[in-house]
Every structure is written in C-alpha cells, then in structure tokens.
Amino acid sequence: MSEKIKLSAIEKVKIESDALRGTIRQSLQDEITGAIREDDQAVIKFHGMYQQDDRDRREERAVKKLDRLYTFMIRLRLPGGLITPDQWIAAHHVAGENSTGVIKITTRQTIQLHGLIKAKIKPTIKAFNEAHLDSIATCGDINRNVSCSSNPAESPLHDKVFAYANKISMLLMPKTKAYYEIWLDEEQLVDKKAEEDPLYKDRYMPRKFKIGIAIPPNNDVDVFTNDIGLIAVIENNELKGFNFAIGGGLSTTHGNADTYARLGTVIGFVDTEEKVLKAVYEILTVQRDFGNRSDRKLARLKYTLDRLGVDQYRKEVEKRTGFEFEPARPVKFITRGDLYGWRINDRGRWQYTVFVENGRVVDDEKCALKTALLEIAKTKRTNFHFTSNQNIIISDVAEKDKVAINKILIRFGVIEHTDGASVIRKNSIACVALPTCPLALAEGQRYMPALLSKVEPLLQKHGLENEHIVMRMTGCPNGCARPYAAEIGLVGTAPGKYNLHLGGDHTGERLNKLYKENLEESQILSELDEWFASFTKERNGDESFGEYSWKKQIALEGLKFIKNNI
Ligand code: SRM
Ligand code: SF4
C-alpha cells in the first residue's frame, strides 16, 4: 500500500498511543468530566470498552446545560462463548454492583455490561480478572472475540473444534502490556522490547477483524459473515481440517454506494493444526499490509479481497505460509437456529438451551432468568455457553443433576418462558441500538419484542405460526444483528423507520435483497401480511419463506425490467 495516501485520523492515534496506553491514566483521574479524552476513546476500545452516553437523556441534559451522561460499555473476551459457573457468578455480581445490572449476550457469544461510570471501570476489570476473565481486544482494530458453534451436543468433535477458538484468540492477542498496567496496576514495563508485536506492529489492523468457526450442519455462528470463517470438515467422525472462507462482512453505509454487505468466499481447505493457525495468521498479515488505511468505510478485509482479487489474495497468503490451500472439501449446512430445551450429547451429558429475548439477561414479572441462572451457577454442576443467536446453553449437566437444575428452571419461570415463546420470536435477534449505541438511527432490542407481538397474529392468520422464519432487526446499517443474512431483515434508517430486506436463506449462505425503504410500522405489517398471504398460496412444497421471497423478488425484478424495456 502506498504510504503517500493520507492516513485516517485513527491510524495516527494508534501509532502515537504508546502501545495502546494513550493518556488513559490521566483521563481516568480527571474528575471534572465523566468522559475520557477524545484520542483515549479510540484507544480504550482495544481494551474492550466504549465510551457512550444515555441518548434518552441528551435533550433534557442539554436544556439544563449539563454535560452528556457519559458511561462506558465493557465487552468480555470469551472465545466460543464458554463461561464457568464461578465466572457467571462473578459477572452477575459485577453487573449488579457496577453497571445497569443487565447482562447482555451479544451476537458474537460474549457478554456486555452497560452504564459503568468512569470510576467503576477499574474495579470492574479487577473483579473480572479475579474470575480469570478479561476484555482484551474485544473492540478496536484487532482480532475480536472468536466465535464457534456453541452447541456441545451438535457433534462428538465439538470439544476438538471448540479448542481452536481459544488457540486462535491466544495466537492473535496483542503483545502490549498496557491492559495489565492501566487496569490491574501491574508494574510498568522497563524493557519495551518485551512487547514488540510482530503481528500488529504499531498500527494494528486497518479495521476490526472477526473470525468464526462453524461445525456443519449448523451454521449458528453465521460463519460467512466473518473476515475469516473456518468450516470444520468432519469425515468418518474425524476432524480432517477446515475449509477457509474469507471476506465476509455486513456493514453498509446509507447513501454510500461503495459500501456493501458480502459473504465470505471459500478459498480452500487446510488440514493440520499447525497449518490452520499459520493460514489464519497470514490472512491477517495480508490484510494488515494491503488493507485500506485512509478510508475506514472501505477498510475491512472484504474490500481488500475485492480490490486484489480472490486469487491474488490467496496467492499472497500462500507465499507467506509456504504451503498451498487444498481444494475445499464438501460440507453441508442445514440450519442455524438454536436447539431449545433439554438435549443429551454423545457423552450422556445434558444441556438446556434457554431463550433469552435479544440476549438481555434480566428478571421480569414472568421469568426471573437472572436469578435462575445465578441459582444454577451456585450448584457448580453446569457450564454456560452463549450462542450467536444471543441465547444461553446450560451445559454439561450429569443425569443425576438434571432434576435439580430442571426444578430451578421451572421455579423461576424459565421453562415456561422458553416453551411459550413463538417460533418466530425464538428465531429472531435484534441489536442493542438505543439508548446506548451512538450510531443508532432507530430502535433495536427495545422495539423488536413489540413488533413481533404484531407479526405473530399475522403468521397465525395465514397458518404460518410453526414456520421457522429468521427475522432480524438493527437500528442502523452496520448490521450488528446480521439482518442482511436473515429471511426478513429490518434495518433502521430514522426514528420509527426501517428498510425491509427479504430473501436470505435458512443456512446463512445467501444475503437477502433490499425490498422496500423507509417503512413505518403499519407499512411493515401490511407488507408482511401480503407476503405471508402469497407465500401460503404460492409456495412450492415445503420451501422456506426466505427461498420463496428470494425467487419472487427475482421474478418481480424480471417483470420490471421487461416493462422498462418495451
Ligand atoms: Fe456491532 C459498532 C454492538 C456485532 C458490525 N456494534 C458497534 C457498537 C460498538 C457502536 C459503536 O461503534 O460505538 C455497538 C455497541 C452498542 C451498545 O450500546 O452495546 C455494537 N455489535 C454490537 C453487538 C453488541 C450487537 C448485539 O446486540 O449483540 C454485537 C457485539 C458482538 C461482540 O460480542 O463482539 C455486535 N457488529 C456486530 C456484527 C455481527 C457479527 O459480528 O457477527 C456486525 C456485522 C458483521 C461485520 O462486522 O461486518 C457488527 N458494529 C458493526 C459495525 C460495522 C463494521 C464495519 O465493517 O463497518 C460497527 C461500526 C464500526 O465499527 O464503525 C459496529
Ligand atoms: Fe448500534 Fe447499528 Fe450496531 Fe445496532 S446495528 S448496535 S444501531 S451500530
């Protein structure tokens, strides 16, 4: 990449950050404001935090001439989304003491706490550290939390594949000791050589970097939406290696035609662990060296890949690894939903998948989910896995403990809540959006439950209530709930308005199409009503709603083309 190109402002911040220390210490000591210095707001992301403010209260505070109500969001690093009972107990208490109290399961299998005031960040990180939890590199221009198919009952090889999430996360951790010095008061490094970083150097990646691992036939992680998607190849009950898909990424910017959502392209197969890790590493170094560092909107790997060409990118990786990718092996995805309720795995261990609406772990009048999970954690007889669909799996339950765990689930209304949720609700996800997300143009998780309550009767009217339709909503086009890979995607454009996307497939292997723009609720509902009606009448056998709406849109586009050209 030519260095004459003007670098984006963040590039300068990274270079001058003294290995991600910035002036965070001074910012923390400044008692005049609840915020931190502007450059530190970029640096702190690499430590897993975002500065935010309560957008619901902006106006009221502005009238009173008060500063915004600044708080911080912290996101944990949990490769593959696994957390032990002790760690859950720690997270429960930290959330209660230092944040809003809500534990938010994210679409990349980890948890976030919101609403931490500046003075609470350090105690929070210290408490997490005592529970062997950290938030290193969960945000910023760096490899993020590595996701992995979450369902231990999915395959006898789950543990083996799952281990890669941790290995990759460790391989791609930054070398700087800034996190330990700033948040955990460890001694300052004297010999800076010890933190020289051959991977990230002083500029880190051009943009965020995401890796997901899928175990077919379940594509619960939406593997093709990652910068690198690893697809486990299992033959005769043996893990043979992984197919590599690169260049996935969903964000678009309204009105910027140069930006687009893209699914990863499969570039080949790699067998041994050593080679898999090497290939992952060098895919990063190619993006590090060739990625766009002047325009952050065009900086993800997907744009580098399309600029260089897939063959050129792969060859550059092969040059650096010293081996070639083999042709991709056949794999088949069938689903990407979570398997709710009790299931048993090949080792005779039980698991219960809980439906957590939009990933918000809270107690309400019907279901005391947060209390139930704490009680279950206190038994120390389970583990917990977060899923990419924002749910939680209570896993590794021995036969003898199942009754006791089940009793807790019943007592706090969790089973009723999970069984009672409609099929569409259990196949839906929404992003955080308002009031904390600074980029939100419309509501996400606060609105989705109410909208679903209006979509459910429509499905019933057309006899479609048992249809597995994946519906997702985001408050802006960044795509945090992966709406472009949904059968019905709603993407916020302005308060109360959404673009309607239709036609994604069931397995996350095809993006949907933008059908109509800027719809209000009544328009969304009447569009869906019409689509459900025609789907019931015209569907081919048991074809899915995504398949039907995809084909129908293509037919409609064909008709429009003919009309415009005669
Ligand atoms: Fe995201 C930015 C929340 C998954 C694409 N995302 C944000 C921020 C941090 C807003 C910001 O930059 O200030 C949001 C914080 C909201 C809040 O108050 O908590 C935010 N993203 C989330 C989460 C919590 C959504 C959720 O409800 O679960 C997910 C956290 C995942 C995690 O644990 O790491 C989350 N974000 C995603 C995904 C889905 C995925 O990775 O599977 C995407 C689309 C896939 C992709 O990356 O292409 C996604 N988030 C973005 C983008 C667009 C990136 C780009 O390529 O341009 C932004 C904006 C940015 O980075 O500038 C963004
Ligand atoms: Fe915020 Fe947009 Fe992501 Fe929703 S999709 S959390 S509104 S950045």
Image (cartoon, grey):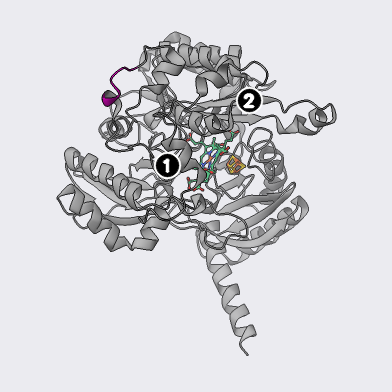
Decide which of 200, 216 is in the foreground and name it. 200
Question: Residue at point 38% right, 62% down?
Answer: 307
Classify 10 Å Cα crowding around label 1: few (below 14), some (14-19), many (20 and above): many
| Magenta span main SS | loop
Decide which of 86, 206 is in the foreground and name it. 206
Q: Is residue 471 magenta?
A: no
**Residue 341: where, in percent of width, then height?**
48, 30
**Residue 32: where, in percent of width, then height?**
68, 18
Determine which quarter of the picture holds residue 530.
bottom right
Classify 10 Å Cα crowding around label 2: few (below 14), some (14-19), many (20 and above): many
Asked whether mark 2 lies closer than 8 Å to ligand 1, one says no
Quarter containing the C terminus = bottom right
Q: Amino acid at mark 1?
A: Val
Quarter containing the N terminus = bottom left
Residue underneath mark 2: 35
Of the residues under marks 1 and 2, which one precedes in the sequence?
A: 2
Q: Amino acid at mark 2?
A: Ala
Label number found at residue 221: 1
Magenta segment range? 189-193
Residue 338 visible in this rendered orientation of the protein: no
Q: Is residue 140 above or below residue 558?
A: above
Residue 44 visible in this rendered orientation of the protein: yes
Decide which of 554, 480 is in the foreground and name it. 480
**Residue 450: where, in percent of width, then height?**
71, 39
Looking at the rendered structure, the secondary structure element under dot 2 is: loop
